[in-house]
Amino acid sequence: MPQLSDRELKKGSAELLILSLVQSRARHGYEIAKLIETRSKGALSFQVASLYPLLYRLEARGWIEGRWVEKPSQRRRRYYRLTGEGRKVLAAQQQRWRQFIEAVRGITGVGFA
């Protein structure tokens, strides 16, 4: 298994979280940030200053696609969805995380629910 540096691990986890959340349906940035915070029970959060540049990078790589949507009596929002290339990247990242979790479990003996 390839070794990941701490920085790569943090960067990869942020990408994995975002790609996972837009896998099932398109979501806007604020919704992505709130879901990360809610589903992690507050353990993880993204500030707008770091989330949007990451969304733009993922879009530039072709992993997600953004589209502006205007709804009556709401502000215009950019919704992001996973692309075909993004699905491939997500599958590969999920596999690496499974390997990482198994490696940690093997060393620590700690089981994960």
Image (cartoon, grey):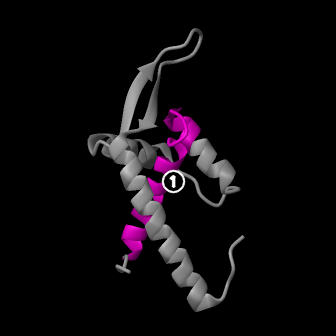
- Position of residue 47 measured from the top left corner of the image (x, y, whole percent): 51, 48
Q: In the depicted view, which residue is nearer to us: 37 or 92?
A: 92
Q: Specify the quadrant that holds the C terminus.
A: bottom right
Is residue 110 covered in magenta?
A: no
Residue at 43%, 49% (x, y): give it: 50
**Label 1 belongs to which residue?**
17
Q: Quadrant of residue 111?
A: bottom right
Q: Which residues are magenta?
A: 5-32
- Position of residue 28 measured from the top left corner of the image (x, y, whole percent): 51, 33
The residue tagged with tag 1: helix, strand or loop?
A: helix
Amino acid type for the residue under numbered disc 1: Leu
Q: Specify the quadrant that holds the N terminus.
A: bottom left
> Could one spot residue 63 in this view of the protein?
no
Q: In the depicted view, which residue is nearer to us: 81 or 14?
A: 81
> Could one spot residue 39 in this view of the protein?
yes
Report the number of numbered marks. 1
Q: Is residue 18 left or right of residue 64?
A: right
- Position of residue 73 measured from the top left corner of the image (x, y, whole percent): 59, 10
Is residue 6 covered in magenta?
A: yes
Task: Characterize the magenta stretch by its predominant secondary structure.
Answer: helix
Q: In the depicted view, which residue is nearer to us: 8 or 89?
A: 89
- Image position of 8 with respect to 71: above or below: below
- Position of residue 8 measured from the top left corner of the image (x, y, whole percent): 37, 69
Q: Quadrant of residue 3?
A: bottom left
- Callout 1: few (<14), some (14-19), or many (20+) C-alpha neighbours within 10 Å? some
- Image position of 101 with respect to 11: above or below: below
Residue at 37%, 52% (x, y): give it: 88
Residue at 71%, 56% (x, y): give it: 41
- Image position of 46 with respect to 80: above or below: below
Residue at 48%, 48% (x, y): give it: 18
